[in-house]
Amino acid sequence: MTLLKIDHLKKSFNKKTILEDVNLEINKGDVIAVIGPSGSGKTTFLKNINLLEHPDSGTLSIEDKKLDLSHVSTQDELWLRRHIAMVFQNYALFKNKTAFENITTGLIYGKHLDKKEAAKIAEEELKQVNMLDKKDFYPSQLSGGQQQRIGIARATALKPSVILFDEPTSALDPELVGTVVDDIDQLAKNGQTMIVVTHLISFAKRIANKVIFFEDGEILSAGTPEEIIDNPKNDRIKKFLEAVSRDK
Amino acid sequence: MNVNFMIESMPKLLSVLPVTIFLSVIGVIFGLILAIPISIVREKRIPVLAQIFDVYISLFRGIPIIVQIYIVYYGLPRLLFLLNQNNPGAKGFTMPSMIIGIVAFALNASANLSEAFRSAYHGVDKSQYDAAISVGLTKSTTFKKVVIPQLIPNFIPNFTNILLDLIKDTALVYNIGIVEIMGQANILASFSFNYLEAYLDALVIYLVVCFIFASLLSLLENKIKQHVFA
């Protein structure tokens, strides 16, 4: 069942094309890994999906609602963000709020839940990522891995249809990557629909049922992890995967 | 050195201390009131207004404050007269020096404070804004709950510098007839020719006043930082 459909998404900046006619269809429970070289438009793609950046054109359909991305009202923007949450590369936890408040802020002021209900959800989510004992800690008092797990809890607390992950492990110390990967893997197993931009090919293979390869602002190739990662037919993808494995 | 003169003059100088404090504090308050919309207009790059404020800020930051005081002193009454020319009963405008001083200080402070606001705002990471928007907050709630609480601790050190500069700059308003600490020191010294002693008294007062304001604002900054960032 199609959950999210993006058609002809285009974005340019200062006359430079960043996204060139991107089309994507995602079913409920899909985990899409987005791979590709730096500067290929992967992050911009995510930011255009939840309108942190505004596309020049394109449509987005989710939950029986179709939005013309070139003219989205403020009301629709807020509606969309209640359905599509995001986890950031640099965690982006609110520095002036505790771990607990980081989660309740979106619930209270975004979803308009009462404080009691928000508190209950926040505690559940913190428990889920084994961070309940750190609920009153501020981001500056947490390690990168802990911050990212709060970031994940903040996104899942909103009970979104889709979660976008923008390189969730790339700012972490190598030894902290594992716990965050496990948390995301657990979400995938729970049937959470996700789009994950990552440089970790093994991670992409582990969690995704579909991989898309981005280059120069467009999807060069899409398929199962076996098709794209294990047996790439496209020379450009082969070269990229070789370079990535060499770097390791 | 006439120590007795210094001791006897101190209460006379302190009697005009409220003028110094009133002028700088009221100047900075009006400056803040003006700086907020100026910063917003410049940050949003609202056409025409943003360009006007760009010039305004360059002007006020590039001209010595004594020149600004004189321009307001001679220019403001004339401007008000011109604006009121159609009124048949209009006469030449005279304005109390204190008003002139406050206007000059507020204009000067507004230019510097709006720059301080800008740098404090840019000190808040853009990802904080993105994260707040991404969890469904409106722009105004994002500013209220995330951006402004983080901006204030960034703003206070620059605000302190601007306020201390204004306190020290009050020494110049003697030129337009306002008797504050420097003015009073000049008057007392000219009667007895104890210039050094009178200025040493003024030095002590300025130093103590600036120290008190700097300490209070530093205390406030730490308190806010503790409250905002634990």
Image: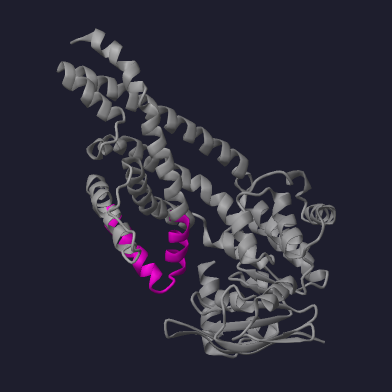
A95 part of magenta stretch:
no
Which span is picked out in magenta? Answer: B35-61
Relative to B15, residue B76 above or below = below
For this view, does A21 lie left or right of residue B192?
A: right
Figure quadrant of residue A60: bottom right
Q: Position of residue A142 (x, y in %)?
A: 64, 47
Coloration of the structure image? one colour
Q: Which residue ends up furthest to the top in the rendered image? A: B4
Q: How many marks?
A: 0
Q: Position of residue A79 (x, y in %)?
A: 73, 75
The answer to whether one can see residue B15 in this image is: yes
Q: Position of residue B43 (x, y in %)?
A: 45, 65
The residue at the point 52 percent across, 58 percent down is: B125
- Between A20 and A33, the one lying in front of the other is A20
Figure quadrant of residue A186: bottom right
The answer to whether one can see residue A88 in this image is: no
The residue at the point 39 percent across, 52 percent down is: B110
- Between A167 and B190, the one lying in front of the other is B190
For this view, does B88 lie left or right of residue A116?
A: left
Q: Position of residue A218 (x, y in %)?
A: 55, 87
**Majority secondary structure of the magenta segment?**
helix
The residue at the point 81 percent across, 60 percent down is: A113
Relative to B182, residue A100 above or below = below
Q: Which residue ends up furthest to the left in the rendered image? A: B193
Which quadrant of the rendered structure holds the N terminus of chain A?
bottom right
- Between B99 and A90, the one lying in front of the other is B99
Figure quadrant of residue A26: bottom right
Which quadrant of the rendered structure holds the C terminus of chain A?
bottom right
For this view, does B224 lie left or right of residue A210?
A: left
B56 part of magenta stretch:
yes
